[in-house]
Image (spheres, rainbow, N blue to C red):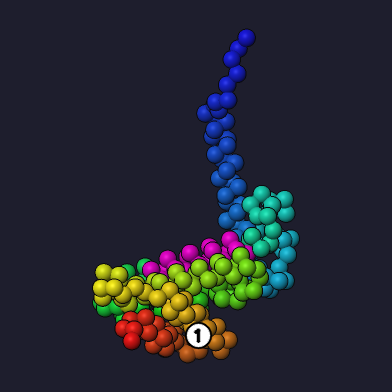
Amino acid sequence: MARMTTELTPARRYRGAEAEERRAQRRVQLIAAAVQVYGERGYQNATVKAVCEAAGLTERYFYESFANSEALLLASFQTVTHRLLHTLALAGEGAGGDGQQRALAMLRAYFGALQREPRSARVFLVEIRGVSKLVDGALADSLDEFGGLLAQALLPQALLPPGRKLDPLLTAGVAGGVVHIALRWITHGYAPEVEVVARTALQLALVLAHEPD
């Protein structure tokens, strides 16, 4: 009697890889479509059907990647946030100079990105709020990371005085303040220009570099 084996043939492994790649691509399409739809009509007015139509996919493909609409919102927010924070980090690294110049470069990149990509900005700033505790937790994490980037630009760990640590409440508070500046700026039609609003936000961020009493 022939032995049974669970080993996959190369052809089967290849087909499996192709199927996984297609699934991953559909997930990317759904996230991109969600950002578009949320940006146009808001999360509360966005249906699974509308997102799938924007992605060019049938609804059955939605549920292979996401349990529900909230899961897609969370994935969309995390995608937008990761892209934005990566842009900020690169801007800070490329600025050179002192901490203030690095932080200003990051803030220019932040406000510039919000202006260039208003749909993503709506997901990052507006649609994410108050949906659920899980989603609120993701927002809090993003503020921690945003504030941490600004703090690291202004006062790298290697330059911290002995015994001093960055205050996580302060970094989150500064990041939240910058977000509120951004919300007001967008409400007023992206006025004043990016350079002006970035320098305004820098005044708040500089709190992170001050020595505590």
At which x and y percent is residue 26? 61, 52
Q: Is residue 83 magenta?
A: yes
**Nearer to me, 169 or 175:** 169
At which x and y percent is residue 29? 60, 57
The number of numbered discs placed on residues in the rendered structure image is 1
At which x and y percent is residue 67? 68, 55
The residue at the point 73 percent across, 65 percent down is: 47
Q: Which residue is mark 1?
A: 181
- Left or right of 154? Residue 193 is right
Q: Which residues are magenta?
A: 73-89
Q: Picture quarter containing residue 88? A: bottom left
Residue type (three-letter) at the residue carrying disc 1: Ile
- Left or right of 10? Residue 30 is right
Q: Secondary structure at mark 1?
A: helix
Regarding residue 97, the answer to whether it shows in the image is yes
Q: Picture quarter containing residue 112? A: bottom left
**Nearer to me, 165 or 137:** 165
**Nearer to me, 24 or 5:** 5
Classified by dominant secondary structure, the portion drawn in magenta counts as helix
- Left or right of 57? Residue 123 is left
The residue at the point 61 percent across, 74 percent down is: 129
- Vertical placement of 138 versus 66: above or below? below
- Left or right of 27? Residue 206 is left
- Vertical placement of 199 versus 158: above or below? below
